[in-house]
Image (spheres, rainbow, N blue to C red):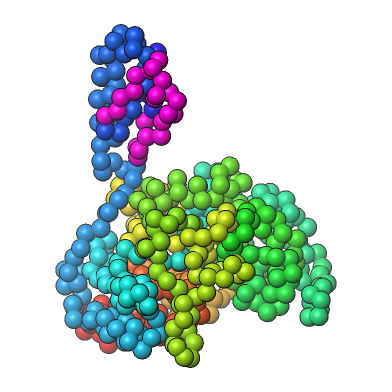
């Protein structure tokens, strides 16, 4: 009888229909209706009734989307000593003054309330462009927990199992080989068949035997020769193409034998595409970013967002900081993620985000999969995923879950850390942790690659926050 076109956010309408004299188009709030003139009169009252019901259903603050769910609280109201958080200021003021970095954003939330946030230094030094809380950062490997969550969602729906062989979704991974030796002159190699298949579990835990080219001298020549992309590219390459090539190369070791950091999570991005039937970027947008209100998170941005994108720098001797080059011959350039073909979606390192957006994600994880009335995964699914999944294997003194490093009771408790804290960081000097005992999220975002001072900044920030709790309870 008539046709309704509506969406929760905005209307996408057919201009040919709207401009046609054979149809009448009208819109109220978030509802658009198209119908013929005769039907408009005949079904006027019915239309009004339906219109009212839909408008009520689309009222703001419904659980379909979370926009700004955070309140601000004083440190004292959360049991902290306010002055102790000034150590964060001291750390980043020194880092900017001594040119350890150009600028940074630091944020701390307790019980879902922000107790500290501040921007330091510059988004761009030469332009004297001051850093702001809302600025966008390339978060590199802080993309990995988000991709891992997508896999957990698909497992929850039955689209995949953690025990599934990866070849079920990416046939090229069948009959995997394990590397024996590499000829350093021409990058030829010898290999033997793997005794077992790579599973989704192996990918989630970085025990697949798939490493990074840029961080692994053994595999670097093989990856370079095959044209494997570690992070991003300006060229029109797809995730499907890159992962298919990667699958033809040998593994560094047998799946499950060791913990080896690498492209496992990028492979999972392709698994998401196959298991869901959606492009990876669209899956993340529909099932994670939009539900949580992460409007400033994505793989690529257009020019309208360029003024909020922080400039990436590299440490060197003189001058201490140099802008990362915009070299069209390189895969990773300083103008990533604004330029290029924008077709490669690296689930292991390709996302960019803001401090507030990433807090939405981290807080949902701390809350057991829910934020401000929006649930993106079941609590029991997430709780299981946050437990040690690598058995007796180690990541330093710590363990690894489905998406995070986790500190066990006998783990690395330096810098006043709590057991069961989960965390990860990114190559461009970004870091976060979720302290499940103190119900705290800490996020630090800057843009340095490489960085000689990364460890001092990471640990200094973490220690300053954790000591604020200890000071409140009279601990050292």
Residue 390 x, y percent position in the rendering: 57, 68
Q: Residue at x 32, y 76 (%)?
A: 128
Quarter of the C terminus within the rendering: bottom left
Question: Could one spot residue 64 in this view of the protein?
Answer: yes
Image spot of residue 75 (x, y percent) = 19, 72
Instruction: Give the quarter of the image for residue 130.
Output: bottom left
110 or 28: nearer the viewer: 28
Decide which of 256, 120 is in the foreground and name it: 120
- Is residue 290 magenta-colored? no
Can the viewer see residue 194 in this picture?
no
Q: How many marks?
A: 0
Position above or below: 430 against 273: below
Indicate left or right for 219 with 141 as reference.
right
Write the start and end of the magenta stretch as one range.
6-28
Residue 296's place in the image compared with 45, above or below, is below
Residue 260 higher or lower than 26, as above or below:
below
Q: Residue 319 appears in which quarter of the rendering?
A: bottom left
199 is higher (above) or lower (below) than 96 = above
């Amino acid at each position: 009888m008539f046709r309704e076109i509506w969406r929760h956010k905005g209307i996408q309408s057919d201009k040919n229909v709207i401009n046609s004299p054979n149809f009448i188009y009208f819109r109220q709030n978030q509802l658009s209706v198209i119908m013929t003139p005769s039907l408009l009169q005949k079904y006027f009252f019915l239309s009004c009734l339906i219109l009212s019901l839909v408008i009520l259903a689309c009222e703001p603050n419904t659980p379909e989307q979370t926009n700004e769910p955070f309140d601000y609280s004083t440190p004292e109201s959360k049991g902290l000593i306010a002055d102790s958080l000034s150590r964060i200021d001291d750390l980043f003021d020194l880092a900017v003054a001594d040119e350890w970095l150009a600028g940074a954003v630091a944020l701390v939330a307790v019980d879902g309330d922000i107790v500290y946030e501040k921007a330091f230094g510059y988004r761009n030094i030469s332009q004297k462009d001051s850093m702001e809380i809302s600025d966008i950062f390339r978060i590199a490997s802080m993309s990995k927990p988000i991709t891992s969550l997508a896999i957990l969602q698909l497992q929850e729906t039955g689209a995949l199992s953690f025990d599934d062989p990866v070849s079920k979704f990416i046939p090229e991974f069948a009959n995997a080989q394990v590397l024996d030796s590499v000829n350093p002159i021409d990058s030829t190699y010898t290999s033997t068949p793997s005794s077992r298949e790579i599973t989704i579990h192996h990918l989630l835990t970085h025990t697949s035997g798939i490493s990074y080219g840029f961080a692994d001298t053994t595999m670097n020549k093989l990856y370079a020769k095959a044209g494997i992309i570690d992070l991003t590219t300006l060229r029109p390459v797809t995730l499907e193409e890159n992962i298919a090539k990667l699958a033809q190369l040998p593994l560094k070791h047998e799946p499950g034998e060791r913990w080896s950091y690498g492209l496992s999570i990028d492979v999972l991005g392709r698994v998401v595409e196959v298991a869901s039937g959606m492009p990876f970027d669209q899956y993340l947008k529909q099932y994670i970013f939009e539900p949580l209100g992460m409007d400033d998170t994505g793989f690529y941005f257009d020019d309208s967002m360029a003024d909020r994108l922080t400039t990436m720098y590299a440490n060197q001797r003189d001058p201490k900081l140099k802008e990362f080059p915009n070299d069209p011959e390189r895969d990773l350039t300083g103008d990533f993620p604004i330029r290029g073909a924008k077709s490669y979606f690296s689930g292991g390192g390709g996302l960019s985000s803001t401090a507030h957006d990433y807090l939405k994600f981290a807080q949902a994880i701390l809350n057991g999969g829910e934020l401000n009335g929006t649930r993106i995964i079941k609590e029991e699914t997430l709780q299981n995923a946050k437990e040690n999944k690598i058995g007796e294997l180690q990541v330093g003194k710590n363990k690894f879950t489905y998406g995070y490093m986790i500190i066990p009771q006998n783990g690395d408790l330096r810098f006043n850390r709590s057991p069961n804290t989960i965390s990860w960081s990114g190559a461009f000097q970004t870091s976060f942790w979720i302290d499940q005992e103190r119900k705290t999220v800490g996020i630090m975002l800057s843009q340095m690659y490489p960085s000689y001072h990364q460890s001092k900044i990471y640990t200094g920030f973490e220690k300053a926050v954790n000591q604020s709790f200890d000071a409140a309870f009279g601990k050292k």
